[in-house]
Image (tube, rainbow, N blue to C red):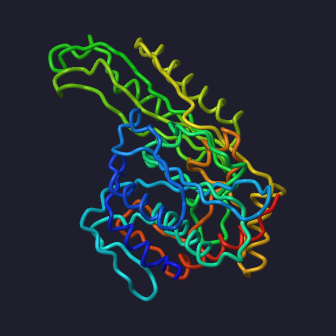
Amino acid sequence: MALNVVEEFIKLTTIDSPSKKEGALAKYLKQRLNELNAQVIEDDSALITGSDTGNLIAFYPGNMVTAPTIMLAAHMDSIASTEGLIPQIRDGIIYSDGEHVLAADDKAGIAVILALLSMLSEDKSITHNPIEIVLTVQEEVGLIGVKNLNYKLKSEYGYVLDGDGPVGTVINAAPSQIGLDLIVEGKAAHAGLEPENGINAIVVASKAISSLPIGRIDEETTSNIGVISGGTRTNVVPDKVEIKAEVRSRSMEKLENQTKKLIAKFEEVSKEQRSKFSYTKELAYESFAIDSSHIVVRSALEAGKKLGIDVTLKGTGGGLDANVFNSRGISCVALGLGNEKPHSKDECISIDELEKSVHFLLAIFKNARM
């Protein structure tokens, strides 16, 4: 008998798996995948990531001659601990208990994958491509698991079950992100006796920040100042402040231009205020955009037609494991699962959307061919 996706999801939510502590969930999933006739391995990425488990990779054989392998991916970590979570079901909706996140992001994705494999195991008449399942660690803290995935994947294209929006939402574009560490150095002085002899690094940084566009720059570009650290005591003019910032865009040209503007403003203000400025920048992940003509999108569009589900192609402002898979040559989109208010104690998902996700994914596989 095929597993119940709702029961499976609730079971998964009760297994605590915050970033770096996904081991208990990985242990459960190894057993579950083996029961569903998938071959499972764990990579050795934990040596680098610091998680108590590596990423899991499982292979479920297809029954179509020469059909390409399709990847299904989700992440095992949750944004916060769910230890002690008791999910609540009211009026067909699964809620958190109000004390924890529900971790539908992304245990809903894992539950849907397991339910699909269960259906394929039970009904051998369903023809389908070989399936490669990738379950990653530390997605929530910077796509760390997928970046350090130590396994040569066979898949030609795939679906990341971690998108926002209702079932039928296909995330076919996501931005690149540049992370910035900015340092402004002023001059220390006694704040009460000789403040005029100091250069307040916090004030310098504040002048630069206040003259920059922050937040939504345009429909595909954002900028954010996320962390500011500086100063030691109130009676000392602070001589150093460190700022962590980011710029995201689905356009590489806009990404570079906005980053240059931000850096130039800090350089300009620092020079005016006789302070020093230095920075480092890192491309955290690269953007992707999958055309509607690609089979990974076409299969979803056809599945929606057959099930009467409106399929919407959508760009997102967030980073996904799909960014990294695409940069490595595996064309991926992310699928919306209908979960709402992720990363909050009000997180919830409807039973209807959860069940619909399974049928939508199954229909996608029925439309996937060469």
Q: At 52% across and 43% down in the image, what residue appears?
A: 146
Quick one: 63 or 299, which is closer to the camera?
63
Residue 88, by quadrant, is: bottom left
Drawn side of residue 18 relative to residue 286, left or right: left
Q: Position of residue 345 (x, y in %)?
A: 34, 66
Image quadrant in which the C terminus is located: bottom right
Drawn side of residue 286 relative to residue 293, left or right: left
Task: Look at the picture and state if 27 lies above or below 191.
Answer: below
Drawn side of residue 370 relative to residue 59, left or right: right
Q: Position of residue 103 (x, y in %)?
A: 40, 63
Drawn side of residue 253 relative to residue 282, left or right: right
Count of marks, rendered view:
0
Quick one: 11 or 171, which is closer to the camera?
11
Q: At 56% across and 77% down in the image, what residue appears?
A: 353
Q: Position of residue 299 (x, y in %)?
A: 77, 65
Residue 352, by quadrant, is: bottom right
Q: Position of residue 69 (x, y in %)?
A: 70, 54
Quick one: 36 or 109, which is closer to the camera?
36
Residue 294, by quadrant, is: bottom right
Task: Look at the picture and state if 69 lies above or below 362.
Answer: above
Task: Look at the picture and state if 359 lies above or below 137.
Answer: below
